[in-house]
Image: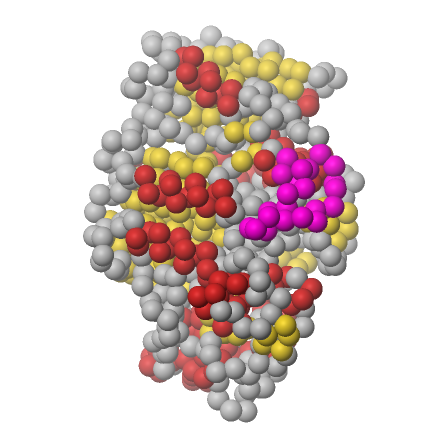
Amino acid sequence: MPNITRRQFLAVAAAIGAELAWSRQAPAASKVTWHERRDLYAEGVASAEPDSDSVILWTRRPFANAERGRLTVEVAEDAAFTRVLSQRAVTVLAESDWTCRVLAAGLAPATEYWYRFTDDEGNGSRIGRTLTAPRERDGRPVRFAFVSCQSVNEGAQNAYRRMIHEDEKAPRSAQLGFVLHLGDFIYEVVEYPDEIKTRYDRTIYDIGRIPDSRKVLDFHVPTTLEGYRHVYRAYLRDPDIQDARARFPFVCMWDNHEFSWLGWQGHIRYPGEAEPAQALKVAANQAWFEYIPARIKKASGPGLDRFDAPKVVNAPIETYDENGLGVEPNNLKAIESLIAYRAYRYGRHVELVITDRFSFRMRDPTDRPEASTLGSADFLGMFPEEAMRIIDGGRAYADGKPPQNLSDGIVSIPNFRKDEAPVTILGKTQKAWFKKTLAHSRATWKIWAATGGTLDWRADPQNLPEGLGKPWPVSGYAGFGGDDFGTAYHERAELYDFVRDQRITGFAVVSGDRHSFWAGYAAKALPPRDFEPVGIAFVTGSISAPGMVEAQEHKLRKDHPLRPLFLAEAPGQQRTQATVNLTLHRGVRSALEYAKSGDLAAAKALTNPDLSPHLEFIDMGGHGYSVVSASAEAMQTEFVCIPRPIRRSTSPDGGELRYRVVHTANLWKSGEKPRLEQKVLEGDAELST
């Protein structure tokens, strides 16, 4: 074990807002009277971000008619607690919603431990299991899952049940080291079943009423800290989320729904104009800090048991710097109240570079009023790719020669972006940190944990046959709008050029948010521009939140001329097929052929090779999780896809599988192009491979 002192660990614990539990050298039988009372610890237990010496432990235990309470935390080498290494009294406070964070330190690397919490009357939490990380020089293979987008309000978390079942069956060497959660741990947009009983295929499940909520369309959203806390408590009472947190250490990053659906920085936006919401951003950060244990530093100081929220007001945000960051003081204080981007090293082979997609980003320019006349509903979300590049690039487009006007082929408007900086999602400071971290990493695999996808999604409607709806108004490709790196062309190119120029090998991206499975290559551009992959990239399907295919099944009318590009009742098929997978991967001609004949071989023969050379796999209707296995020689990414999670499975394994597909990349040398090999291990991936 590295020679690190208790005083040094105490400083680390203070920095992340945790108590410290230091292990003793000789294990001994527990002397604590403990009887399990899960009803008193209704949100369960959790562990987070293990390193080789320590791990964060968490629980919530309310006390009636009090402002504080006391718990004892124990860490043991066995589930029976006959070999207890650490025992510590910790305080829980009403002002922190009775949540507790403990840094269990002085542990052995790559070791399994058990932990529990007990009050002074012997009322105990459930027992949790956790793992420490291997040392930085440890060359054993690393195995972790990555997940995103779970909706307790609209779905069942069967993917976690499947993950737990498979991990319990696996030999210790093949078990997961941790679960990387890439955001949308909660959905702050909540439906009430007495107002709306179903959406798409989903039954609306009751998760209670948000106190002081605001009604937005069919949803209710928090307006206070108590509102966010209510949603977290409701999610953590889901049995499968709770069981997963009790079995695996989690490494978490927020995305948009932990704050606000269409929010960014300290703004919220619902139908209508954006509003300043600095106080709400602080409230969202505080609730995340209280319920999601993580090694992140809060700006308000090193308090051990409380967030100490900065005082902010919702002041107009009217002045922005060159990178679109609102410089209004309350906005900056709100953003900086909790800085979550960070690196996470796990053994010799993996370093995660975890980024924040919404706290520092420029406003999405396609969301601005100046762009409101662009885009036709006739094309179902397809928008000319070159126009998207002009909007994204601002004054940097075409080597600093942007056009005076901007057109979607139907409407022409003045180019409102021609004198502005290119879009940034990371912002200046985070981007500089990202580059520095990548350049200095010595891990075999440098894995960008990007909460939103980085792979382009585009189509070739220029190849539509005459007479199929309105003609595509331009000669080039179409992109699909989005607020992730799939359309942040300029900034993504800057980052990928950096990877190339620094001769970085083993660069990979794992992401979520798209509610779909994607596998392919990290490349800054597609044909007719040069296609130059610098790494590999993956998107995991949602745990349970609905995706594009399910939405289109309910919203896209059957007589729409472009419906076959998205959905088809193909000959010989028992159910509707997601032809959008062919549209995005192989082109419109391929999708139309399959919709007409049901002949997949004939459809593949019509593939447009220039459309998506960056894609090896896409399933726009996929739910489940993904597993990375990284070694000195290769990185494997396995997609574990389950049926649409409409209701909770009662079987221990979480129910049936749709498919299991593994993608393998051998480590490439500098200057070489990465290559993915794909193998279907179980089930039928249908139109995705």
Q: Where in the figure is residue 204, as x and y percent of width and height?
A: 67, 53
Front residue of this view, candidates 18 and 172: 18
| Left or right of 484, for residue 140 | left
Q: Residue at x 76, y 39 (%)?
A: 211
Q: Where in the figure is residue 64, as x and y percent of width and height?
A: 72, 19
Q: Is residue 617 above or below residue 503?
A: below
Q: Is residue 624 visible?
A: no
Q: Is residue 421 above or below residue 222?
A: below
Q: Where in the figure is residue 247, as x and y percent of width and height?
A: 44, 33
| Left or right of 57, for residue 26 | left
Q: Residue at x 34, y 30 (%)?
A: 133
Q: Where in the figure is residue 185, as x and y percent of width and height?
A: 56, 43
Q: Residue at x 61, y 54 (%)?
A: 363
Answer whether residue 321 is magenta in the image.
yes
Instruction: Locate residue 1: give its quadrant.
Output: top left
Instruction: Locate residue 81: give its quadrant.
Output: top left
Q: Is residue 10 visible?
A: yes
Instruction: Locate residue 143: give its quadrant.
Output: top left
Front residue of this view, candidates 615 and 164: 615
Which residue extends farthest bottom?
Answer: 467
Front residue of this view, candidates 551 and 104: 104
**Range covered by the magenta-colored residues:** 312-334
Q: Colour mode?
A: secondary structure
Q: Residue at x 36, y 82 (%)?
A: 606
